[in-house]
Amino acid sequence: MKQLIIKAINNKKLVSFNYKEDARVVEPYCYGVTFKGAEALRAFQVSGYSASQMPGWKLFHLSNISSLHLLEDEFITPRHDYKRGDKGMKIIYSEL
Protein backbone atom coordinates (compact mmCIF):
# COMPACT_ATOMS: atom_id res chain seq x y z
CA MET A 1 0.00 0.00 0.00
CA LYS A 2 2.78 2.45 0.91
CA GLN A 3 4.49 2.14 -2.48
CA LEU A 4 1.16 2.61 -4.26
CA ILE A 5 0.52 5.83 -2.31
CA ILE A 6 3.99 7.14 -3.18
CA LYS A 7 3.42 6.24 -6.86
CA ALA A 8 0.07 8.05 -6.81
CA ILE A 9 1.62 11.20 -5.30
CA ASN A 10 4.54 11.18 -7.72
CA ASN A 11 2.23 10.73 -10.72
CA LYS A 12 -0.64 12.94 -9.47
CA LYS A 13 -3.12 10.06 -9.75
CA LEU A 14 -6.35 9.82 -7.80
CA VAL A 15 -6.76 6.87 -5.46
CA SER A 16 -9.85 5.09 -4.18
CA PHE A 17 -10.05 3.18 -0.92
CA ASN A 18 -12.30 2.19 1.93
CA TYR A 19 -11.77 4.16 5.11
CA LYS A 20 -13.40 2.53 8.11
CA GLU A 21 -15.44 0.60 5.51
CA ASP A 22 -16.73 3.70 3.66
CA ALA A 23 -15.64 4.36 0.05
CA ARG A 24 -13.57 7.47 -0.72
CA VAL A 25 -11.79 8.97 -3.75
CA VAL A 26 -8.95 11.41 -3.05
CA GLU A 27 -6.14 13.43 -4.56
CA PRO A 28 -3.08 12.31 -2.52
CA TYR A 29 -0.67 15.08 -1.51
CA CYS A 30 1.48 14.00 1.44
CA TYR A 31 2.35 10.65 3.03
CA GLY A 32 4.24 10.41 6.30
CA VAL A 33 4.10 9.91 10.05
CA THR A 34 2.09 12.17 12.35
CA PHE A 35 3.45 13.56 15.62
CA LYS A 36 1.44 10.85 17.39
CA GLY A 37 3.34 8.18 15.43
CA ALA A 38 0.63 7.11 12.99
CA GLU A 39 1.34 6.66 9.29
CA ALA A 40 -1.05 8.95 7.45
CA LEU A 41 -2.07 10.36 4.08
CA ARG A 42 -2.99 14.02 3.66
CA ALA A 43 -5.39 14.22 0.73
CA PHE A 44 -8.13 16.26 -0.83
CA GLN A 45 -11.28 14.12 -0.88
CA VAL A 46 -13.31 14.57 -4.05
CA SER A 47 -16.03 11.94 -3.60
CA GLY A 48 -17.39 9.24 -1.35
CA TYR A 49 -18.63 9.24 2.23
CA SER A 50 -17.59 12.01 4.62
CA ALA A 51 -18.89 13.02 8.04
CA SER A 52 -17.43 16.51 7.51
CA GLN A 53 -17.31 19.08 4.71
CA MET A 54 -16.92 17.63 1.25
CA PRO A 55 -15.00 18.09 -0.93
CA GLY A 56 -12.16 18.99 1.36
CA TRP A 57 -8.81 18.32 3.00
CA LYS A 58 -8.58 15.20 5.17
CA LEU A 59 -5.98 13.26 7.09
CA PHE A 60 -6.38 9.49 6.70
CA HIS A 61 -4.58 7.05 9.00
CA LEU A 62 -3.21 4.14 6.99
CA SER A 63 -4.35 1.69 9.69
CA ASN A 64 -7.96 2.49 8.69
CA ILE A 65 -7.44 2.22 4.90
CA SER A 66 -8.28 -0.92 2.95
CA SER A 67 -8.79 -1.83 -0.70
CA LEU A 68 -6.60 1.01 -2.00
CA HIS A 69 -6.51 1.35 -5.82
CA LEU A 70 -4.61 3.69 -8.11
CA LEU A 71 -7.04 5.27 -10.59
CA GLU A 72 -6.38 6.39 -14.14
CA ASP A 73 -7.68 9.91 -13.41
CA GLU A 74 -5.06 12.59 -12.78
CA PHE A 75 -5.07 15.95 -11.06
CA ILE A 76 -2.67 18.06 -13.09
CA THR A 77 -2.50 21.22 -10.98
CA PRO A 78 -2.18 21.01 -7.19
CA ARG A 79 -4.90 22.74 -5.18
CA HIS A 80 -4.14 26.45 -4.69
CA ASP A 81 -4.27 26.11 -0.88
CA TYR A 82 -1.83 23.18 -0.71
CA LYS A 83 1.45 23.92 1.07
CA ARG A 84 4.48 21.61 1.12
CA GLY A 85 5.90 20.60 4.48
CA ASP A 86 2.67 19.42 6.13
CA LYS A 87 2.66 20.74 9.71
CA GLY A 88 0.77 17.66 10.89
CA MET A 89 3.62 15.32 9.90
CA LYS A 90 6.71 14.56 11.96
CA ILE A 91 8.24 12.61 9.05
CA ILE A 92 7.34 13.02 5.37
CA TYR A 93 8.06 10.13 3.01
CA SER A 94 6.53 11.66 -0.11
CA GLU A 95 4.76 14.91 -1.03
CA LEU A 96 3.90 17.01 -4.05
Image (tube, rainbow, N blue to C red):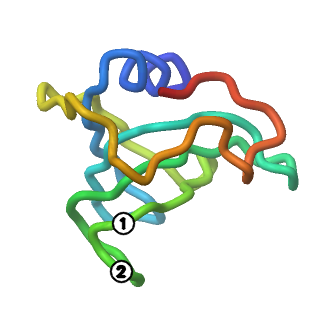
Residue 71, numbered circle: none
The residue that disc 2 covers is: 53
In the picture as drawn, the residue positioned furthest to the front comes out as 80
- Cα gap from disc 1 to disc 2, whole angstroms: 6 Å
Which corner quadrant of the image does residue 13 belong to?
Answer: top left
Q: Residues within 10 Å of mark 1 (few under 14, many from 20)?
A: few
User: At which x and y percent is residue 7?
Assistant: 41, 16
Could you say which is closer to the camera, residue 29 or residue 79? 79
User: At which x and y percent is residue 70?
Assistant: 27, 28
Name the residue: 33% across, 46% down: 79
Query: Element at badge 2?
Result: loop
Say which amino acid is labelled 1: Gly
User: At which x and y percent is residue 52?
Assistant: 41, 82
Q: Are marks 1 and 2 in contact (CB under 8 Å)?
A: yes
Name the residue: 76% across, 39% down: 33
Name the residue: 46% across, 27% down: 5
Say which amino acid is labelled 2: Gln
The residue that disc 1 covers is: 56
**Where 39 falls versus 9 (above or below)?**
below
Name the residue: 51% across, 17% down: 3
In the picture as drawn, the residue positioned furthest to the left comes out as 73
Could you say which is closer to the camera, residue 69 or residue 46? 46
Query: Element at badge 1?
Result: strand
Q: Is residue 92 left or right of residue 30?
A: right
Could you say which is closer to the camera, residue 18 or residue 48? 48
